[in-house]
Image (cartoon, coloured by chain):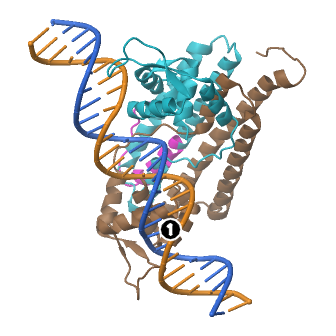
Chain colours: A cyan, B brown, C orange, D blue
DNA sequence: AGATCCATGTAATCCGTTACATGATTGC
DNA sequence: GCAATCATGTAACGGATTACATGGATCT
């Protein structure tokens, strides 16, 4: 039950059309909650019908025409209540540790290069976050909202670091295990 | 598309009935992939119909009677192929950073105690992992499969540490922010 | 005028969650 | 024999993913 709230947040930060929201979900917001345009349009429809948002008055709103949405007081209220709700953390659901465990049963096979690939992807994402940090907050956050944005960003950084530290460990271990059988391991990117 | 493979892995490690699988998913496996008994029974049905597993011959298999499953060669082959598949990591989907970002827009409200609660939950899970590590691997892993189990466990530990480090940072920041309003006016901008 | 892209949507399917149902086993 | 519990399911709903459809704008 988080997508509607992600959308409300995004619309409060800046009223947008469905396609703009889709683009924004591919950038900053999407690093913590992804959504396809189909999900977004469907959810916008629901939110409008529920009276939490409304389409801004526009010339001729037909199919294929941009439709901007803004949040109504009722929507802001719903978001506020969600922020203060109590909600337990879910277990992480990542297939990679699962695949590793499966590899323990059917043999590691070709899993090592895949793990290297994942580490490199996580490193790339980490670099992206650091770049945001540098670009948007070199002088430190100014407003309260900026402080919170930076905090969220640092969350991404901490989590990515956790992944990278694990994946690096996994690469070492697996190199030993399958290195006993196969050849040396090459990594795409060293530092 | 990971639940069937999680089940295949579990069944290869040890043939089990639906209820036994459910219990195992509440323990070790469930720390990386959770599943309810309804999901498990449905998936067992599908896997059986697809010829990847079969119910072990038993006296009278009726409703309410235990039914043990084992993996067929075709199932093992499917699992092996999944291990070697290429599959991109998904973005983490955790509502908490999202709620924090929403708090940046509608005000932090009562979010601080909730974040403290989450940190404590993550700490508890971390302790649990460390206890597994101590209990099952004090003499170090012996077989290749044990090495991999330990590796997966350490994955949980690294990720939890990432969360805890972020949540602790968030608690510090938020205390400052909402402390600026609740308590005496201490507007000494740090940094 | 036709091709291409952009914005908005519909439809089908699968996965996950919650609520409920029924047969067997166990403890009193 | 009755209640509680265990094991195995069914049903309904909603979210997420993928494939496809349609109208408008733009470029050539």
* Left or right: residue A79 compared with residue B32: right
Q: Quadrant of the N terminus of chain A?
A: top right
Confirm whether residue A167 shows in the render. Answer: yes
Residue A58 colored magenta? no
Image position of A117 with respect to B35: above or below: above
Q: Residues within 10 Å of mark 1 (few under 14, many from 20)?
A: many
Residue identified by numbered label 1: B21
The part of the chain drawn in magenta is A167-189
What residue is at 37 percent from the left and 67 percent from the top? B45
Whole-percent x, y for residue D15 in the image: 48, 42
Task: Tell which of A61 and B17 is nearer to you.
Answer: A61
Q: Position of residue B107 (x, y in %)?
A: 71, 25
Q: Position of residue A61 (x, y in %)?
A: 37, 18
* Viewer-nearest residue: C12 or B118: C12
Rendered location of residue B103, percent (x, y): 67, 27
For disc 1, the chain is: B
Residue plotted at (59% across, 38% down) = B95
Q: Is residue D7 above or below residue B13?
A: below
Q: Quadrant of residue A107?
A: bottom left
- Mark 1: secondary structure: helix
**Residue at left 66%, top 10%?**
A139
Query: In the rendered image of this protein, does residue A158 appear above or below residue A91?
Result: above
Q: Is residue B133 left or right of residue A181?
A: right
């Amino acid at each position: 039950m988080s997508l509607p709230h992600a959308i409300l947040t995004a619309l409060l930060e800046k009223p947008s059309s469905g396609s703009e929201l889709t683009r924004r979900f591919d950038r900053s917001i999407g690093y913590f909650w992804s959504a396809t345009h189909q999900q977004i349009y469907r959810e916008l429809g629901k939110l409008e019908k529920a009276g939490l948002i409304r389409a801004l008055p526009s010339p001729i709103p037909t199919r294929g025409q941009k439709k901007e949405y803004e949040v109504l007081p009722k929507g802001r209220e719903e978001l506020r209540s969600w922020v203060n709700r109590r909600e337990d953390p879910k277990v992480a659901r990542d297939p990679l540790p699962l695949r590793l465990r499966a590899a323990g049963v059917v043999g590691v096979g070709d899993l090592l290069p895949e793990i290297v690939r994942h580490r490199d992807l996580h490193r790339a994402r980490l670099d992206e976050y650091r770049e945001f940090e540098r670009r948007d907050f070199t002088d430190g956050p100014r407003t309260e909202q900026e402080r919170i944005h930076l905090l969220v960003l640092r969350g991404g950084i901490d989590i990515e670091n956790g992944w990278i530290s694990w994946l690096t460990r996994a690469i070492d271990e697996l190199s030993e295990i399958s290195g006993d059988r196969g050849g040396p391991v090459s990594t795409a990117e060293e530092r």
